[in-house]
Amino acid sequence: MFAIVQTGGKQYKVAPGDVVRVEKLAGEAGERVELSEVLVVGSDDSVTVGRPLVAGASVAADIVEQAKARKIKVFKYKRRKKYRRMQGHRQQQTVLKVVEIKQAPVAQA
């Protein structure tokens, strides 16, 4: 089973047992978070696509750690003007371990 979730303005394909780095979420290591913005839920035999979200679906994940990404360097430069600016940035991230994918039962018509 897999799901595509949206968090922090980005989309991630996750399955139970996956470890994913996402934009910083509130919480401490060891806590459980619920990702409710599920766009797609799929298994071996069927795929449910939301419009825009899958109703009643969510992904439960445990916070492994609060971390920082690699440092990126931002360099501004204007030639022949003696203008140079260097700045660094490290994005805050949360490392999640996906525990389960919950899906509401599908009503048969």
Image (cartoon, rainbow, N blue to C red):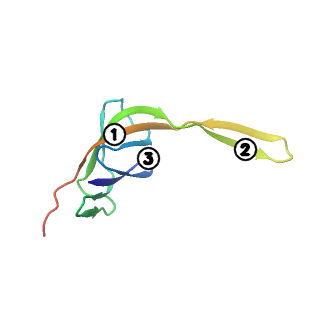
* Quarter holding residue 104: bottom left
Disc 2 residue type?
A: Lys
Q: Report the residue marked by disc 1.
A: 97
Disc 1 residue type?
A: Lys
The residue carrying pointer 2 sits among few (fewer than 14), some (14 to 19) or many (20 or more) residues within 10 Å by Cα, namely few
- Residue 15 spot, x, y in % from top left: 31, 49
Question: Do residues under tags 3 and 2 come within 8 Å of each other at their CB atoms?
Answer: no
In this view, the residue in front, 109 or 66, is 66
Q: Report the residue marked by disc 2.
A: 76
Foreground label between 2 and 1: 1
- Residue 32 spot, x, y in % from top left: 29, 36
In this view, the residue in front, 33 or 2, is 2
Q: Report the residue marked by disc 3.
A: 8
Q: What element carries label 1?
A: strand
Who's the residue at 25% across and 57% down the image? Answer: 55
Q: Distance between the residues labelled 1 and 3?
A: 16 Å
Disc 3 residue type?
A: Gly
Who's the residue at 38% across and 35% down the image? Answer: 26
Residue situated furthest left in the rendering: 108
